[in-house]
Image (tube, coloured by chain):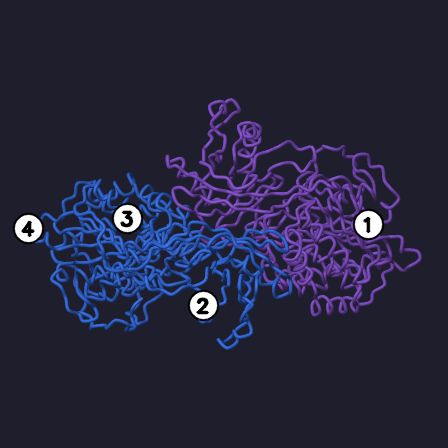
Chain colours: A purple, B blue
Amino acid sequence: MKKSLLFTALLAAGITGSAWAQEPVNTEMNSRIREEGMNHSQVMDIAFHLTDVAGPRLAGSPGLKRAQDWAVNALKTWGMVGAKRESWGKFGKGWEVQKNYAAITVPYYHAIIAIPKAWTPGTNGPIKGEVMLIKADTTTDLAKYKGKLAGKIIIMDAPALPERQVGHADMSRYTDEQLAEMAKAKMAPAGQAPRRGGPGGNPFAAFARLRALRAALGEFLINEKAALVLSQARGTDGTVFTTNGASYADTAKAVSPELETSAEDYQRILRLVKAGQKVEMEADIKTEFFTKDLDGYDVVGEISGTDPKLKEQVVMIGGHLDSWHAGTGATDNAAGSAVMLEAMRILSRIGYHPKRTIRIALWSSEEQGLFGSRGYVKNHFGDPATMVLKPEQSKLSAYYNLDNGTGKIRGIYLQGDSAARDIFQAWIDPFKDLGATTVTISNTGGTDHQSFDAIGIPGFQFIQDGMDYNTRTHHSNQDTYDRLVEADLKQAATIVASFVYHTAERKDMIPRKALPTPRPAGAPGGR
Amino acid sequence: MKKSLLFTALLAAGITGSAWAQEPVNTEMNSRIREEGMNHSQVMDIAFHLTDVAGPRLAGSPGLKRAQDWAVNALKTWGMVGAKRESWGKFGKGWEVQKNYAAITVPYYHAIIAIPKAWTPGTNGPIKGEVMLIKADTTTDLAKYKGKLAGKIIIMDAPALPERQVGHADMSRYTDEQLAEMAKAKMAPAGQAPRRGGPGGNPFAAFARLRALRAALGEFLINEKAALVLSQARGTDGTVFTTNGASYADTAKAVSPELETSAEDYQRILRLVKAGQKVEMEADIKTEFFTKDLDGYDVVGEISGTDPKLKEQVVMIGGHLDSWHAGTGATDNAAGSAVMLEAMRILSRIGYHPKRTIRIALWSSEEQGLFGSRGYVKNHFGDPATMVLKPEQSKLSAYYNLDNGTGKIRGIYLQGDSAARDIFQAWIDPFKDLGATTVTISNTGGTDHQSFDAIGIPGFQFIQDGMDYNTRTHHSNQDTYDRLVEADLKQAATIVASFVYHTAERKDMIPRKALPTPRPAGAPGGR
């Protein structure tokens, strides 16, 4: 369905422009925002500094600190007030890779593509050892390996790569039909939030059983002094999706060094060992823990409100700045961070003095459980476990989040806040020509707007094209600057800036849903 | 178009079964071949030994020797006679990688995905150095770098990765429409052979200019004692397509160590350096040259003919066993080698005693210019430069080659030998249910059947589904066993065995084209 047909279909369904015609749109301001956002963008330069220059930005790592410092400085340079790193509470240990080398040496030499699992230790210098396959379905199966694993490199069985599917593309965008379906959606029952990231899914499930078994093995391998553990990564063709192999808690118990190994390299080793071929490897892994400051930090900065009656009220935008460690977290989520920074820059650059205060927050430890935004929300707005609110809670009009990769904005999830539908439809309508059309009542999960939604503050995530987020970049070693699509990031920053402008100028705050019921810590419904 | 529609279309076009009905097909023997090939296949085990166990099989390398020895032993085990390695002439130096490590260390640590270019030296131990961007369009531009490159790691400008295309799939098979087009093709004018590898093309061209410039730089970099050269590889997402960085000739002059670097890693370094960021790296590359035996070898073996009048005549099948060095050359061309070995095994296993002698040859140095097959042809059949023939030339009925990856057989290229059309159409017709249908007059180039075609012997390459050959595997670090599709290899071995059977039993040899005109060495029309 072409866009014109879609529009005709909407008209035919009785959804006409008049429904949201009363929500004012400032066309002149939109033009100024567009001019700055589309023709004088700095979003790629911002993204370059957050990715290539800062490096991987795992929570608590020096790379994240570099990116935070750069962002604070950028906000100050653009004239923001109160730009700073702000502790959201205690996180745990920082960690980074300082050497990463592993190779097969017998039956022939082959350097493998593998990434240390986050928060695992190194090998304490170069090691050499024979690969040993452990077959264990239960803890009692381990007895037969007692005394045999010292200095060995451990693997376990893992499924072979499925045959590549004819016509399967890494890259996708929403079709007009898919967007039309989303616009028509009814509210999903509670607890059935759609998965994040647009079309496609995260095939993590196949590894869950294996990971659980490995967890049981952990203590045994430590006691037996295994030299190194290999696990098979999700991904193909040298793309390695990464995870953590140990807790970041300062009290975390010891684990073995562990390499998330490209599926092809892992399967080669596995096939050889299963066939009775001797495989030897060498490795040299060095990782460093940082325990001097266990706090987690967000970056914040503001454009002060100027209306005497409204300047105490706030519009917030944000995204998480932390990433996984194998790439430079370009699409997850330097993209969203860069877009939000650029939106602030645009609004500042055009000389806009908002009625309400505009605040950006770049979260940390999102990847470990939305900790940066949850901590911030708890510190400023209230505790979702008790629903005891702080005064600031009543003054935040809305929070807008971006964290679904490099894809342009195609619309916005209402997160069930039906009273906002006509407002957002009016605001997004001027960006039809840029591909943004859709307001859906649906929830989307998995990122920081949920922390706001949980305390009764309107929190929204934009709909973004899926691109290669689930197939290649999300948490992988291939999440690098190369995957950022300049035209899409410019579009997103322009639309975000416009939404922020209209939220800051609006007569009233964004209408709210009913306050949620208290959700004690540990209850379902979180990330 | 569905197969039934295609068939209807062919009937409508007046091409009916009667055109090739007179060429006999042995249905009972086809059944026995199918039973062994489809239900008792050993093709995956053969491929496992040629890839995982032998390792990379660069011409002249120990890995190729391991695979050759395994193949000779397998042929003997299956009862072939005369199984051996046979020298085709002088090749040059063997070479293999014995250590491969490189990483960015400043502004932060990141191990890169990179492969030493074939026949380049190592770093002579661990090195550390700063990355320096050389901008030079001509040799005279180099003067400004004189005295500044000692111990440096050299990069040059290279194009950024293009945006991934929505809907672009790595994996493809021929559609019925494409096959119907191929069947209808007229003979292409001489010198316009279609590209190898099925749908898609090899985008090597973009790098040609860069490579030419690098060649001019070579001597300068050696004289200036640059520590290491990085070049940007074709490929994305950790997939690295490899080439050679120096000659294999025993008289080749010295070059600098050079790493073909994944595009993402290369571009990251390039972006940083161009932005004025200091980048330092460490590397430890060890490569070994083998000069004890400079000869190149093919593997040969036979099932002896039993018909007193025909046993001096020969049917040959083959494919090249050598590969590039980054992966294990699974689709290029362990696949074809395994299929040909399996075809020999099938014919032997079913107790078939052919009228004509059946010979397999697994070539080497195909990747450097079809040298293994050209040398064999020159030794046995004649010299295409003079067209002076040897007696064996008149006794070889046909040569069948397989070297277009793991995709199943969809038909056969006649290579202009129109007199063979009805024969092959009759022989392929029984395999319609397995997806093999098409006989095309067209040429296909780039592999060893050309060596036979060049001396007037009917030489054929099968049409194979393109799969992910051009997108992921062909010459890349991802050309591993994982990419082999068992069902396709079984199908191919079954069809090849049937073709060989029918060629060996046929009343006459396969009809020939006119003898080519002599083609002096260095003349166009080769690979």
List the residue tagged with mark 1.
Answer: A511
Tag in front: 2 or 1: 2
Same chain for labels 2 and 4? Say yes or no.
Answer: yes
Percent across and percent down for residue A71 are 74, 56
Q: Residue furthest left?
A: B308
Residue type marked 3: Gln
Is residue A36 rendered to the left or right of residue B233? right
Instruction: Check the residue under mark 2 and report the chain it is in.
Output: B
Percent across and percent down for residue A152 are 48, 34
List the residue tagged with mark 4.
Answer: B308
Residue type marked 1: Pro
> How many discs mark residues in the rendered view?
4
Q: Secondary structure at mark 3?
A: helix
Same chain for labels 3 and 1? Say yes or no.
Answer: no
Same chain for labels 1 and 4? Say yes or no.
Answer: no
Q: Secondary structure at mark 1?
A: loop
Q: Residues within 10 Å of mark 3 (few under 14, many from 20)?
A: many
List the residue tagged with mark 2.
Answer: B218
Q: Earlier in the sequence, mark 4 or mark 3?
A: 3
